[in-house]
Amino acid sequence: MRFTLVAAGLVAILGGSALARTVASVVDQTTSFLIRDWVTDQRFDGFQPPQVFAIEQGTKVYGGCGEFVRGDEVGGSSYCPATNTIYLVPSQLNYFYKAFGPSSVAYVVAHEFGHAIQNRYGSLEGGAEVELQADCLAGILVDYGSTQLGITRQDTIQMAQAAYAIGDPTHGTGAQRTYALLSGMGVVDAGCSKQEMLSLLNNQVSDPAYMELRATRSGAGNIDINKSPYPKTLGGITNGL
């Protein structure tokens, strides 16, 4: 199997094991789909798709975002708007794969592409609501590419579990992150606007599905994820960013 440069970097950092190649394959498939779709979407004319690099945990990165250590954040991925660059940390993705399955890796990658979309539309300013909006955008991207990426409803459960597990004060609680992701995927009746994400952040959402997530402390609770009665389109969302 031949990998793109970023996937090859993932394999090299993880030591070339069978698991490393599997994780790299998921990253390769996800980034290839998202970049291919990006360059053919007229909404992104004049704004190049983000660069994607694999780096080791604890690596210092210098450049447009200043000196900082990447890979210590939850999920081990990050986006630098000044250079339009996504950094992925293989060891963290490896953990996600083993704990939650391959779709959780696709979710992490799509979340960072969500930040790139926010950058395109000048919507990166703010606090945890920005992270929740990126989760919501990730839900749209993954749902849109579900056929190409082979995402099943069981995979949706895995992504929801991953989102719940990585809640923190910077990104929102587990219930908030899961609700934002499911909003983007059209499972619940909510949008991705900054105002809606602020309401979610402040627990001003009365949707029983959100109450279920807060009460059950799990990935999806009893929410029916086999249906997407509220499908979203990227065009409809970006108009509100």
Image: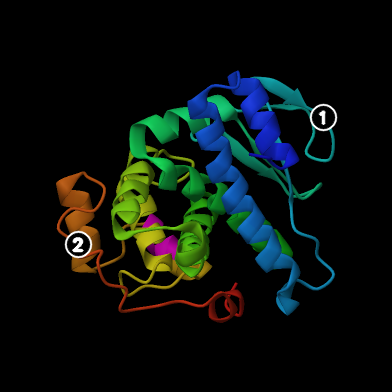
Q: Kindly tell me whether residue 57 is visible in this rendering.
A: no
| Residue 205 as seen in the image, left or right of residue 126 | left
Where's the C terminus, which quadrant? bottom right
Q: Amino acid at mark 2?
A: Ile
- Label at residue 122: none
Identify the residue shown where x is 69% and y is 33%. Answer: 8
Identify the residue shown where x is 20% and y is 65%. Answer: 224
Q: Kindly tell me whether residue 1 is visible in this rendering.
A: yes
Location of residue 39 in the rendering, given as x and y in whole percent from the top left corner: 75, 67
- Label at residue 62: 1
Would you place residue 191 above or below residue 67 in this image? below
| Of 107 and 215, the residue lying toward us | 107
Name the residue that disc number 2 marks: 223
Query: How much space separates mark 1 and mark 2, taking CA atoms?
Result: 43 Å
Q: Could you tell me which secondary element the residue under label 2 belongs to?
A: loop
Would you place residue 78 above or below residue 94 in this image? below
Q: Amino acid at mark 1?
A: Tyr
Quarter of image, res 9: top right
Q: Nearer the viewer, mark 1 or mark 2?
A: 2
Location of residue 98 in the rendering, given as x and y in whole percent from the top left corner: 38, 30
